[in-house]
Amino acid sequence: MRHRVELINKAFAASIKEEDYSGSYRGVFPIKVNQLREVIEEIQDAGQPYNYGLEAGSKPELMIALAMHENKEALIICNGYKDEDYIRLALYGTKIGKKAVIVAEQLSEVSRIIDIAKQLKVKPIIGFRARLNAQGEGKWALSSGDSAKFGLSTGEMLEACRLLESERLEDSLQLLHFHIGSQVPNMLTLKNAVVEGARYYCQLKKMGFAMGLLDVGGGLGIDYDGSRSNYDSSTNYTLEEYARDTVFNIKQICDSMEVPCPDIVSESGRAVSAPHSVLITEVVGRISKKDSMLKVAKDDIKHQVVADLYEMLNGRIRYGRLEKFHDALQKKEEAHSLFNLGYIDLEGRAQADSLFWQICSKLDNGKPRGYQPEELLDLKRLLADQYVCNFSVFQSLLDHWALDQLFPVAPLARHKERPSVNAILVDITCDSDGKVSKFIDLEDEKEYLPLHNLKKNEPYYLGIFLVGAYQDIMGDMHNLFGRVNEAHVFLEDDEEDGFYIEDTIYGNRVKDVLESVQYKSDSLCRQMKKQIDKAIKKDFVKPREGVRFMEMYEEQIQKKTYLDLESLKKSKPKR
Ligand SMILES: *Cc1c(COP(=O)(O)O)cnc(C)c1O
């Protein structure tokens, strides 16, 4: 976290020096990207020497920003839709000496700011959010452009200017802001936005407003898949290039319009916070087509369709791989129809299924040369194992589910051992969408991940990386799993192991998640007890057993929501 804050501040400082730029960099961290107190504290601490500030997009976030912000030189940028209380809070901030810039998203906010500032007798610091024509690219492209829900159109901006002039508040307008969306994969898109934004800035400055700050918003992306491309999960530029281009383009425009260079504000959230966090999940089981294949002996076969499949697998007739695949598929489907009509029994169907998958395995194992038909390439995906992992995609990896965003996934041990299993990851929610089945590949995406065989009595951990932006807070309570355990790890050269664990925070307990949906644990326990007592009276259970059940119920309510792996290990099936 600290490293990222330093990296972005140093990158801008270096570019400013290189370009002989007269302004400075006054970055802010957008709280919405990761609101966790420890994260904000660390960012504030690391950002202190650079006067790195905070950005808020809602009232609760502003409450965080106001209290956590102590460096009077650092900015607080107030974005988002604002009611009177939001504006009043921000203005009180200004009153006690903070540089809280209220960015008007809508025309109506401007008059509201003016009115409340008058009441509070404070000079507001105002910014305008421009609705740029330059469209974002990537998944958040609609954050800008003519029909975006944010920002002032050119007509509205002119009207806002007149309003400020009529109130003699030319000194109050100090910032121009724009934000074209998050994870912008293409440098050119960012550049177009900066050019347009800088023009707006210069125009406002020339109209006689104080100005001084140009806020280029967020959008600085993370190269999640490492491809350095303008693919959605990547970026075709580095953080250093971003800083250099931003500084260079602003300077060019300002010089050409003979306007002094502004201080540059950026609201980079994802780029600052994504790398600090890794999700660690243990593989708790494996669902495998290979494991479930029966050995079929010729003498046990009772049905023609099964015999045909057997022949296809073991016979001597040689024919094309694709043809073989199609024939096998057809036979398997025939077997399913016969089962549905009652003509073959469970054993027959199991034999047919097993033989089919054995044929597929064999087709997939060959080392074919030259062009491969798509259906055969797809066999790897069809044959991939499912590794069951003790987590919820909906809690911890929401953007993979919602937006198909790719994250790097890798086993945390056995790095010198060649992986032998192709697998996808499935979570423990009762939702077929609870899975990770798209992975990073050298080109494009891959539909399975090479992993190691699971060993008995040896835990197998996977790391899912770059999850420090947005995932924590966007995650939801699907199936009531709730928050995961957290360890806050600090790298420290002086420590023997090179790190220390500052804190551990337990994930949600059953009690916590039940309360979030309006259940009180004591009333649940009371309801349970009433029913157990009744069952004892009716002699369904012995009193002692009833008591044991009740004790267990009460105990579980205090326990974790995710799988208890110790109990799983005790009862693993033997294979
Ligand atoms: C979300 C948001 C950001 C952060 O964007 P990143 O792409 O994560 O850097 C910055 N500014 C505004 C106004 C936002 O809404």
Image (cartoon, rainbow, N blue to C red):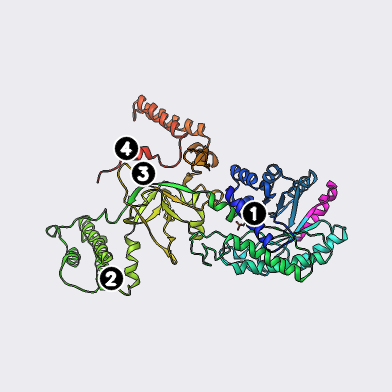
Front residue of this view, candidates 496 and 381: 496
- Magenta residues span 107-125
Q: Is residue 198 above or below residue 499?
A: below
- In the picture, the disc for residue 459 is 3
- In the picture, the disc for residue 9 is 1
Q: CA distance from mark 4 to mark 1?
A: 51 Å
Which label sits in the foreground, 3 or 4? 3
Count up the numbered dots: 4
In the structure shown, which secondary structural element does the residue marked by tag 3 occupy?
loop
Q: CA distance from mark 3 to mark 2?
A: 36 Å
Q: Quadrant of residue 10?
A: bottom right
- In the picture, the disc for residue 570 is 4
Left-right relation of 449 to 305: right
Q: CA distance from mark 3 to mark 4?
A: 13 Å
- Residue type, label 3: Pro
Mark sitting earlier along the chain (2/1): 1
- In the picture, the disc for residue 368 is 2
- Residue type, label 2: Pro
Residue depicted at 48% across the width and 59% down the height? 406
Labels 4 and 1 touching (C-beta < 8 A): no
Residue depicted at 46% across the width and 40% down the height? 497
Residue 212 visible within the image: yes
Which label sits in the foreground, 2 or 4? 2
Which label sits in the foreground, 2 or 1? 1
Left-right relation of 189 to 505: right
Residue 349: percent from the left, percent from the top?
23, 59
Left-right relation of 114 to 315: right
In the structure shown, which secondary structural element does the residue marked by tag 1 occupy?
helix
Mark sitting earlier along the chain (3/2): 2
